[in-house]
Image (tube, helix red, strand yellow):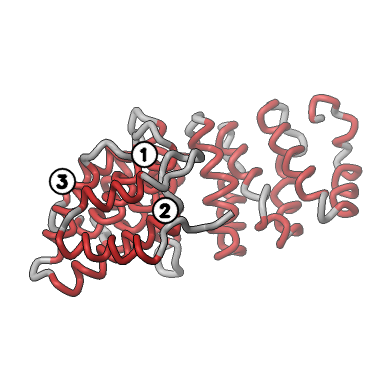
Amino acid sequence: MKDSLLTDYKKKEIVKSISKKDYPRIISILENIKTVHANTAKTKDKRFVISEIVRYILNNSSDKEKDFFNTGTYFCKRNEDVSKEIGISLIWRSYGKYRKETESIFLLTADDPNWEVREYAGVSFAAALNHNDSFYRTLQKWSKHKSENVRRAVVISALGYRDAERYRKAFLLLEPLLFDNSKYVRKNLGPFILGSCFGNKFPEEILKQLKKWGKYRDENVRWNVIMAFNNSYGNKHPEYAFDVLKMFTGDIDITVKRALMSTLNFLGKRHGKEVKKFIDKYKLNKDKEVY
């Protein structure tokens, strides 16, 4: 299946429309090639449009933040999902100058009914945080937002601090969300952000942090800690996984037990012998509730 449905002719038409600020025409072109999967155009085609708009504003604007804000606002306020995705990818660039207005649009987009629009919102949260440390306090407040969609976007925003200088602040931002009992929040936090993203980038640092969090008695925290190894991080560092997982071998909480066996089953696909030794050592095969 093609990763792009835009022809060269349509690309030229889009570039021309950007110079004329004929944004409805751009949306119309993308709407005509949207897929059933998420009711929007393919990722590569949307990235083309976003990059061309960004390039045009950077090369032609005398007030870049203002133009990013106005253009992003226009796209975000339309009904089409693809338009919202383009808009949120533009408007974060105006956060420094239009903080309150941008945050208002952030919240609406992060809580959008379309799951893919919410994906774009989370990525934009991260981009805004990466370039604006002042967004951090707002994200701390939003980690307690009534909408699980917004809280999930805060989880993704931590990627904005995925560097050697700021990853500890990312951990502080994520810690309250470890207690969140929303499945939507959890599946993005433990397995994805903590494991796949931070674990693979900072394997030893996240190991130390997971050991600390593993001592918390809340079952949601323990679930996140265990599931942080249910991915490529665990496969790359099985010794780290076993070092942490042994903390939960006597846990009686059914949610924790299931997370433990799920992670062991996952690791067993590539580290079968090591997993068998682990299960035998802690006699997990005798606990029927685990299976």
Residue 41 % position (x, y): 42, 48
The correct choice, above or below, for 240 with respect to 101 in the image is: below
SS assignment at label 1: loop
Report the residue at 89% width, 47% height from top: 276
The amino acid sitting under disc 2 is Ala
Q: Is residue 269 left or right of residue 111?
A: right
24 or 82: nearer the viewer: 24
**Could you say where residue 268 lies in the image, as x and y percent from the top left?**
82, 49
* Residue 248, image quadrant: top right
Q: Position of residue 183 (x, y in %)?
A: 53, 31
For marks 1 and 2, the one nearer the N-term is 1
Looking at the rendered image, the quarter that the C terminus falls into is top right
Single out the residue that lies furthest toward the front.
9
Q: Residues within 10 Å of mark 2 (few under 14, many from 20)?
A: many
Residue type at numbered disc 1: Ser
The label on residue 158 is 2
Q: Determine whether the residue tagged by mark 3 lies in a helix, strand or loop.
A: helix
172 vs 284, left or right, is: left
In the rendered view, tell whether residue 256 sits above or below residue 28.
above
Residue where numbered disc 3 is placed: 100
Looking at the rendering, in which quadrant would you find the N terminus? bottom right
Residue ID for mark 1: 143
Mark 1 or mark 3: whose residue is earlier in sequence: 3
Residue 107 badge: none
Which residue sits at x=26%, y=55%?
92
Three-letter code, disc 3:
Lys
Residue count near mark 3 (Cα–Cα under 10 Å), binned few <14, some 14–19, many ≥20: few
**Foreground: disc 1 or disc 3:** 3
Alpha-carbon distance for marks 1 and 2?
Answer: 11 Å
Front residue of this view, candidates 62 and 133: 62
For the residues marked 1 and 3, what is the alpha-carbon distance in whole angstroms?
A: 17 Å
